[in-house]
Amino acid sequence: MQARQAQVSQVVVTASQMRDIEGRIFAAGMPVAALMEKVAGLISLRVQAVAGSSVGIFVGPGHNGGDALVVARELHFRGYEVWLYSPFSKFKELTSQHLQYAQSLGIKCYHDVEQLPDCDFLIDGLFGFGLERPITDHIAVAINHLNQWGKPILSIDIPSGIHTDTGEVLGTAIRATHTFCLGLWKLAFLQDQALEYIGKAELIDFDIPGADVQAVLGNPPQIKRITSVTALSTLPLPRPAVTHKYKEGHLLLICGSRRYAGGAILTALGARASGVGMLSIAVPESLKPILVSHLPEALIIGCPETETGAIAHLQLPENTDLSSFRAIACGPGLTVDAAPIFPEVINSEISLVLDADGLNILADMGTIPTLEKRQAPTVLTPHTGEFQRLFPDIADPKSDRIKAVQEAAVQSGAVVLLKGARTAIANSQGAIWVNPESTPALARGGSGDVLTGLIGGLLAQAATKEIPVEDIVATAAWWHSQAGILAAQERTELGVDAFTLTQYLMPVIKNLGNN
Ligand SMILES: NC(=O)C1=CN([C@@H]2O[C@H](COP(=O)(O)OP(=O)(O)OC[C@H]3O[C@@H](n4cnc5c(N)ncnc54)[C@H](O)[C@@H]3O)[C@@H](O)[C@H]2O)[C@@H](O)CC1
Ligand SMILES: [K+]
């Protein structure tokens, strides 16, 4: 049972994949009406957990409307006052039958939204994954009207008007306070632009057979949600009983400038929290004392600096070159004046994480031709603005972030992590991880630096193991956001400065009982 839940919670589908999965279930003999009855029964149980005794239910022409009508009937029998609103005159057959039966029970159906009586909450069953074109005319007017009521709205499957795959608003959309996603997570639930319409999201598992999911999505599926199970499986825990510091990875950070000393410290604290065996930090010479005072365990490499206080060139200790390290993380606080060190960094033959000014310098050099020279794995961690500078020829990440990050990874050969409310990570084969939980508390200067250090530290520890780089990057993204969530729970969303965030990384893992 738990294994099934763990599997279902990782799965993400598009509308067409959901339709194919549904088609297989029906072809195998499950009656359509029986499935609707089962699913809507589960929804009505969840609805009853919401306060209120009178409900307005919006009914669409397809099976989303059919679900809504079964819920209406169930709530009616449970003693709720139920009113229906439907602007349609034609319905799919099953939906039409449910409407007829609901009306025979005395449940009123209004065609004009203005006639719908005042009620405690609303249920949206206008459109599900069958929405195929923008909502216009009187339906759009009605949706805008309902949004202004200020009542809780519970959407069935997806808020009506949201594109199931891209999360775009097609014309207009219901702003739900709560959405019950049916069967499997739809892609829109992982697209930033849909989040403010979805409200609190909940999956209603209705026992879709794993074989049907696998037959349609493949094994492993191309898009996966990161969960605590997937994240923990790649963490370097437990450590082997016999080991030593170099076996647990040696990470080189290249970061900081006279102007941005804090970025170097935060990156280093993120790396420290990863548990990495050895940490070396290359900074401009003048930053050395402050780094030493914050990270007494690290080896601080003071480098000659430019007039502006950036690293002028990498001056590694004697008998050391870049191949002495297992991974490099480079960028936070560097300023673009550190560009002259880049050819050496890019030519290194170990895993490389680039962030912040590291990405800006890469964009100036030309992302794709520059990365072609690299043999070892590269990880890029842009936010939307950096992404657009790195990949000016790729479709706007604002309209479909998941497609954009996928294209960027395929074209560049790098593992690309696109930061956002739902951070997405893609590899060069187009496989994607999306982080399904985060907090706006992390929208704060310096939290990205912490992530860069954390990714670098985990990569350095994993360098000799056969864990795909994108899995490690996904784990770091999950860990980082869970620390933000935990910190926000204890300190509010205003209390999660980047330093505080570093202090919550360990408790996340400890809470899971895996120390
Ligand atoms: N996938 C599954 O396994 C299950 C699906 N069920 C429900 O079925 C839904 C999908 O049902 P349908 O395929 O019937 O699709 P929908 O109910 O989402 O809507 C499709 C209907 O809306 C019309 N339509 C689409 N866009 C429109 C627009 N912009 N303006 C006006 N009309 C528009 C179409 O012509 C069609 O009649 C799911 O979202 C879910 O609620 C559940 O009943 C049971 C299980
Ligand atoms: K809906």
Image (tube, rainbow, N blue to C red):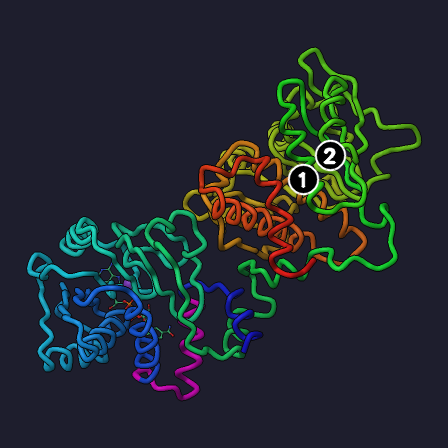
147 is within the stretch colored magenta: no
Rendering quarter of residue 223: bottom right
Residue at position x 17%, y 51% in the image: 149
* Residue at the far top in the pictured view: 307
Rendering quarter of residue 511: bottom right
- Residue 496 left/right relative to 250: left
Above or below, 448 against 439 in this view is above
31 is within the stretch colored magenta: yes
* Residue at the far bottom in the pictured view: 29
Residue at position x 66%, y 43% in the image: 454
Image location of residue 136, percent across then percent down: 19, 53
* Residue at the far left in the pictured view: 115
* Residue range highlighted in magenta: 16-33
The residue beneath circle 2 is 253
The answer to whether residue 290 of the structure is visible from this angle is yes
> Disc 1 versus disc 2: distance between alpha carbons?
8 Å
| Mark 1, other Cα within 10 Å: few <14 / some 14–19 / many ≥20 | many
Q: Secondary structure at mark 2?
A: strand
Disc 2 marks a residue whose amino acid type is: Leu
Q: Secondary structure at mark 1?
A: helix
Image location of residue 291, percent across then percent down: 73, 27
Image location of residue 97, percent across then percent down: 18, 81
- Residue 82 left/right relative to 449: left
Disc 1 marks a residue whose amino acid type is: Gly
User: In the rendering, which numbered label is found on residue 453?
Assistant: 1
| Mark 2, other Cα within 10 Å: few <14 / some 14–19 / many ≥20 | many
Q: Nearer the viewer, residue 172 or 113?
A: 113
The answer to whether residue 406 of the structure is visible from this angle is no
Where the N terminus falls, by quadrant? bottom right
- Residue 177 left/right relative to 402: left
Contact flag, marks 1 and 2 (Cβ < 8 Å): yes
